[in-house]
Amino acid sequence: MTPATPRVLVIDDEAQIRRFLDIGLRAEGYHVLLAATGGEGLGLAATQSPDLVILDLGLPDMEGHDVLRELRQWSEVPVLMLSVRDAETEKVKALDSGANDYVTKPFGIQELMARLRALLRQGAKSGQADASLRYDDDRLSIDLARRDVTVDGRPVTLTRKEFAVLALLVRHPGRVVTQQQMLREVWGATHTQDTHYLRIVMGKLRQKLGDDPTTPRWLKTEPGVGYRFPAT
């Protein structure tokens, strides 16, 4: 292992899943830490400083939600939740509790690796100030400090709410931002159930950016949960 090798902590009580992830992650060049219980996982997180945590919701000694809450008291390490529970309420609860992403079992290893890479990129950038946050690809350019948005070199005029929603997604590249989080941060705590506000703004944003809602390039929908902006 070299100092630059990312450390991934897997907390899962299923030996088969731990073995599967251990093999897959090592094949991709990661250093892997394994824990079968929440208590063991928290101990490794505290002493081994992982770069990312893969956390199962159902553990023998404590709920994954409880592990996440305790972890978030002292660490902002990216957390990818794993669970057989695919209900939207479970996903929203995990993401609102501080998880960065959520994958249901069974899962494809390539999708998992892609999400893991996005979270690691997000974690590497988490210390940047807002003034340095930019997004720029071959079509869309966003400068949060200057409040400038262009598509194909043409300026895009956004309302205050439209820019706030876009900025919130850009600040969390690769991460699912829940509808409730977006409503709370942009409209306020009394509007967390007013999802029609968000749908209207997202529709206008997609129209102004030229982002096809059926195959979105930038404003990706996680049905019933929230939205995701691509990691650079």
Image: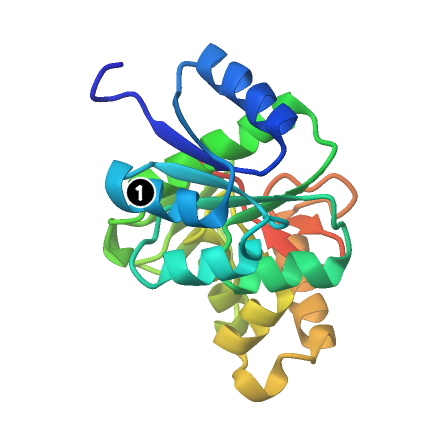
Q: Nearer the viewer, residue 58 or 92?
A: 58
Q: Which of 227 and 70 is in front in this view?
A: 70
Examine the rendered structure and indicate whether residue 107 appears above or below residue 186: above
Q: Is mark 1 on a helix, strand or loop?
A: helix
Q: Nearer the viewer, residue 4 or 8?
A: 8
Residue at 61 percent across and 71 percent down: it is 180
Where is residue 3, by image quadrant?
top left
Examine the rendered structure and indicate whether residue 147 appears above or below residue 111: below
Q: Which residue lies furthest to the top in this view?
A: 27
Left or right: 212 with respect to 127?
A: right
Where is residue 115, by image quadrant?
top right
Residue at 66 percent across and 46 percent down: it is 211
Left or right: 198 with respect to 52?
A: right
Which amino acid lies under the numbered mark 1 shown in the image of this protein?
A: Lys
Residue at 25 percent across and 49 percent down: it is 128
Residue at 27 percent across and 14 percent down: it is 1
Q: Residue furthest left?
A: 3
How many labels were placed on the picture?
1
Measured from the top left, where is residue 35 in percent x and y? 46, 36
- Residue position for label 1: 125
Q: Could one spot residue 64 in this view of the protein?
A: yes
Measured from the top left, where is residue 37 in percent x and y? 50, 44
Left or right: 14 with respect to 162?
A: right
